Amino acid sequence: MPQPSLMTSDLTIRFGGHVAVNQVTCAFHPGETTVIVGPNGAGKTTYFNLISGQLPATSGTVHLGDTDITSMSPSSRARHGIGRAFQLTNLFPQLSVLENIRLAVQARSGAGWGLFRPAHKLTQLKQSAEKYLAAAQLEDKAYMPASALPHGGQRKLEVALLMAMEPKIYMFDEPTAGMSLDQAPAVLDLIAQIKADPDKTVLLVEHKMDVVRALADRIIVLHNGELLADGAPAEVMASQIVRDVYLGSATEETA
Ligand SMILES: Nc1ncnc2c1ncn2[C@@H]1O[C@H](COP(=O)(O)OP(=O)(O)OP(=O)(O)O)[C@@H](O)[C@H]1O
């Protein structure tokens, strides 16, 4: 097993008397897609917020590789390699889809588009932008203003922009929520492409069991803010305690 790319240790947050995430210790590894499941209110989104920095931990730590990122701001964590879809504040609605991706690639590479850039650098940036455009299957929308994209297209663009930033950790919170049945596969394909990269660590909060089955290498279950189970999908889904608290009722709802 390689060194963890991300690790939470005794991670805890209290809201007044309520402990929403309670001493969660968990390591995540490159090349692994972990799906976080649990009943409503279990603490999944709060756990994500603690990792990406939207909420400050009451106690415990978050490490990205060897770096303690517990007290870093969300933007600082993003620069260090935490990529969460909704953190995308770099969307320019009036610019075209391709321009948006180019700007994200440029921001990542730290390069400008000035006249005095070496031509080969500009070519590389354009090629990268086109690669992410193609990965997101948005070629036919390349010159459309980002604001004119339908909902499904915007979600694909979000993922393309996230890919352009080349994070080490990808975090998706119900990535197909609100999407129609015909739109969802394109976003799931994109996540499958990311998941195929052995250097990337993918974390996914998901309720839909078909999505869990399709993408999970590992499942962790949160319940009342605590880590209830952690293991291979078949093993976790078969465990009685998980069936009792979550999968039994959830399967009926989502099957
Ligand atoms: N900012 C906040 N202030 C107070 N309580 C909060 C706050 N954020 C979350 N909580 C509480 O923490 C608990 C966990 O919420 P969270 O949204 O993380 O659950 P979840 O597992 O993501 O649920 P769902 O599947 O419904 O999205 C809930 O009881 C919620 O009401």
Image (spheres, rainbow, N blue to C red):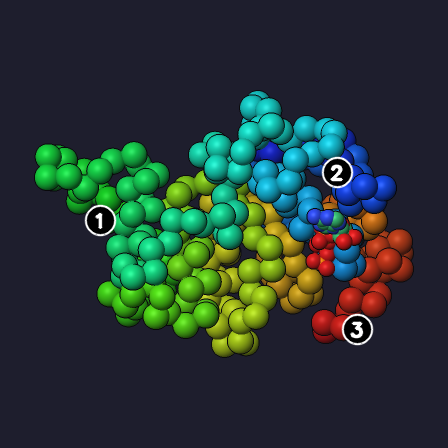
Relative horizontal placement of residue 157, taking residue 202 as reference (left or right):
left
Which circle's residue, 2 or 3, is located before the other in the chain?
2
Q: Decide: marks 2, 3 in contact (CB < 8 A)?
A: no
Q: Residue at x 78, y 66 (%)?
A: 250
Quadrant containing the N terminus in the rendered view: top right
Determine crowd level at label 3: few under 14, some 14-19, many 20+ residues with C-alpha closer than 10 A: few
- Please identify the quarter of the rendering in which residue 117 is found: top left
Residue positioned 77% across, 55% down in the render: 41
Q: CA distance from mark 2 to mark 3?
A: 31 Å
Q: Which residue type carries mark 2?
A: Ile
Label 2 residue near ligand 1, CB within 8 Å:
no
Question: What secondary structure is marked by label 1?
Answer: helix
Q: Which mark is residue 13?
A: 2
Q: Nearer the viewer, residue 33 or 161?
A: 161
Instruction: Give neighbour class at mark 2: few <14, some 14-19, many 20+ (Cα, 10 Å).
Output: many
Instruction: State the residue position of label 3.
Output: 252
- Asked if residue 131 shows in the view, the reply is no
Task: Report the side of 9 relative to 113 (left or right).
Answer: right
Q: Which residue is mark 1?
A: 126
Rendering coords of residue 139 (x, y %): 29, 65
Q: CA distance from mark 1 to mark 2?
A: 43 Å
Q: Sequence-wise, which precedes: disc 1 or disc 3?
A: 1
Amino acid type of the residue that numbered disc 3 sits on in the rendered structure: Glu
Query: Could you say where residue 86 lies in the image, as x and y percent from the top left?
Result: 51, 52
